[in-house]
Image (cartoon, rainbow, N blue to C red):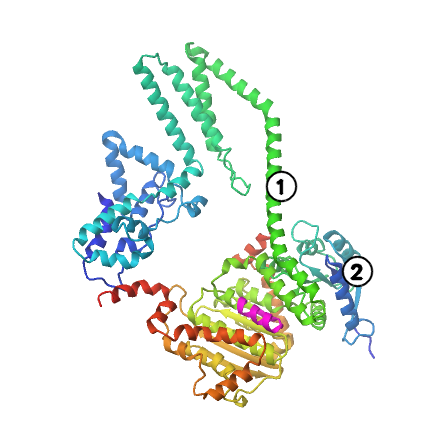
Amino acid sequence: MQTVTGSEEGAVQQPQPPQPVSAPLPAWRAKQRPPLVRHRDDKVLAGVAVGLAAHLGVPVGWVRIAFVASSIPFGAGFVVYIFLWATMLEEGSPTTLSGMPPAPSAVTGALGTSAGSPPGAVASTVPATASPASPGAATRSSGGGTHHHGIDVAALRSWLRSSNQAVVITLLGVAALVAAGALWLGSVGFDVHAEVVVPVVAIVIGAIFFWSQLDDSSPLGGRRPVRWIWLVVGLGFTLLGLVALLVRGTNISELWQVAGAVLAALVGVSVLCAPWILRLWTNLREEQTARIRATERADIAAHLHDSVLQTLALIQRQSTDATTVARLARAQERQLRTYLYDEDSRAGTFGAALTAAMGEVEDLQGVPVQLVVTGDRPMDQHLDALVKAVREAAWNAVRHASPPVSAYVEVGPDAVEAFVRDHGSGFDLDAVPDDRAGVRESIIGRMERHGGTARIRRRADGTEVELRLPVGDPDTTAPAAPATPTATQSTPPAASPVESAQAAASVQPAGAAAPAEQAAEAEPGAAAAPVAPATTRALTPATTAANEPQEQPS
Amino acid sequence: MTDPRSIRIVIVDDHHMFRTGVRSELTSLAGPSGPATFRLEIVGEAGAVESATQVITEQQPDVVLLDVHLPGGMGRGGADVIRACAGVDSRAGSPVRFLALSVSDAAEDVIAVIRAGARGYVTKTISAEELLTAIGRVADGDAVFSPRLAGFVLDAFGAAAGEVAEIDEELDRLSAREREVMRLIARGYQYKEVAKELFISVKTVETHVSSVLRKLQLSSRHELTAWALGRRLL
């Protein structure tokens, strides 16, 4: 059976001593298996063979030959093809995205290898179970396991729930049941008239085809376009069945008459029913729309109640304090914007982190910071440092300079550049006393540790901090930064206890804001300080699995 | 004392409070005895698409301060007004110019009014002085970009990702100089600061910004058309 080929490559690699970084997983498991869907490109009939080949990772030719070869004796391949055609979704259809996740091969593999290990521990347990005796057998059985689990139960269930695949399966079931029933009745001794049974089955099948188009509304009330081919096929089946039922026993010359009568009756009934059905339909749609609107309204009302109304109540109570009112209003505005423009969806990106950091500065200092970000990329530790540096720069700007304060961050293909500009009197870096750790440490030092640069420009009417951080391709993982510089970050270098206390006092004067900021500052250092291995693991969770096998031999 | 230039404006916003606020601020700055270099004459107000179209057609102002979101019309309001008033000339003979004024930061809204024909976009948090400058600039036929709009432009034209036009006339990309100007505006620079930074005249900066505005309105770049399509504008 050619489907095992993929796993045999893995089995060859497996008995060798575990190679932690390059091949922690066998080949068939390391790469994600593409979902089992029909492909529109390169198809000959319906794209079943191409889809199957892509899913199993074998050449298309083999699959096609297998289909043809197995069709010759009893047509088994043909039946399988038809079944797959009916049940496999076409690529790009909406249900392929939600309903059928790309078969998670690591998890399905785990089902085959070690039944006791939880799926989360797969990466670490695989080399361990594979290294003792009979490694080949273990992996080969896991290979078989994967392919049996190729169509997992959840995916099958979601197919059944969705679209016309359910109809086809029902049809096959109905046909099989009727055939079985007829056979049984015939064997028991009842007189089964094929000329009655076959038309009835045809009518039922036609009706199912026809009705399948009614049950197509999506959860939001929008309808998929009706597939007219299904309607036509259903109508054809029903007509044929009716005609066959009525023509039974009479001679063939009356066939046209009967067909005409059936057609006329159908048209008559539909003309009579159409207005009524139409009205029902319109009512239903109106009701549906109203319900959706009511749900949306309730959602919005709940959100407004939790956010805006609460803030308004607070503002009323503190209406004498202009600063507080302004701060509350700004914080609420930002929150509402996040809600309206759905910025939650980009959580975890650099842009979101910047927006959050600037929001924090606004909240704590009560001065708006205009932030413009072009482009975006996923967060990593270097970008995190940049966010902190930008935050520090904005913090200084709102505290020491005068508004408007604007921050512009441009995510380019090979560098991220950030500019924080204010309209204060500016300052000379050389004139800043050495014990002021804010600018020199939190901005310049931090940027340099992460391979970036920082420049402070004094202009006629303000100061501009320019930060630049070279970045690579977002797909390639950034090299793990040495943990030690991060650890030193929290303590100002070459500062006696007295001086550092002064620094803390001068940079961050007493107030509600200062402890919060210090806590945020000290956080990475505190996490990095105690144990070195723990730091690397915390910093790069993706590489922990790769490190595990290295640690096990010792 | 020479008679200063007078600009006739119409304020279109569905919030009465906001209209009143803008009116009083602008009047105190550029009213008959204000300190500004030119006079503003507020000749009309409107709060919906239909009334705005009517007022603008009747009054033929030089500049319309236009909220992006308005009741009435087919789409989002602001763009409908601009399209309904296409071809209306001010009393001075030049086309009526629109300055979009909005609280919305959504790209679709901004791009929608700009592509419908607005000469600029500023947020409602702008100071009265800056608003006055912006009105003067739009009245002269120049473009007004807020830092955020400049950011959108850099994003939409792929300039942030390093795409630069080889010839200036190319509609789908920014030229290197236009990109520089946009970046400085996004950084919060005023036009005269941009000019100083790049060693060019303010007039040249205005030319670059107008050219970017033209590209923004005419380009068929996918991002722009997709944004506009999101508001059913094309």
Element marked by disc 2: strand
Start and end of the magenta stretch?
A: A355-371
The image quadrant that residue B28 belongs to is: bottom right
Residue A59 visible to the viewer: no
- Of the pair A550 and B166, the residue shown nearer to us: A550
Q: Is residue A70 magenta?
A: no
- Of the pair B199 and A326, the residue shown nearer to us: A326
A64 on left or right of A402: left
Q: What's the residue at 61%, 62% (across, down)?
A: B105
> Which quadrant would the N terminus of chain B be assigned to in this image?
bottom right
The image quadrant that residue A342 belongs to is: bottom right
Image mark for residue A290? 1
- Of the pair A86 and A127, the residue shown nearer to us: A127
A46 on left or right of B115: left
Spatial CA span between label 2 and label 1: 39 Å
Q: Is residue A358 magenta?
A: yes
Image spot of residue A388 (x, y percent):
49, 73
Q: Which residue extends farthest top?
A: A250
Q: What's the residue at 50%, 37% (across, down)?
A: A216
Residue type pointed to by label 1: Ala
Q: What's the residue at 26%, 36% (across, down)?
A: A68
Which is closer to the viewer, label 2 or label 1? 1
Q: Tag 2, which chain?
A: B
CB under 8 Å between discs 2 and 1: no
Look at mark 2 in the image and give the residue it sits on. B44
Magenta span: predominant SS is helix
Residue type pointed to by label 2: Gly
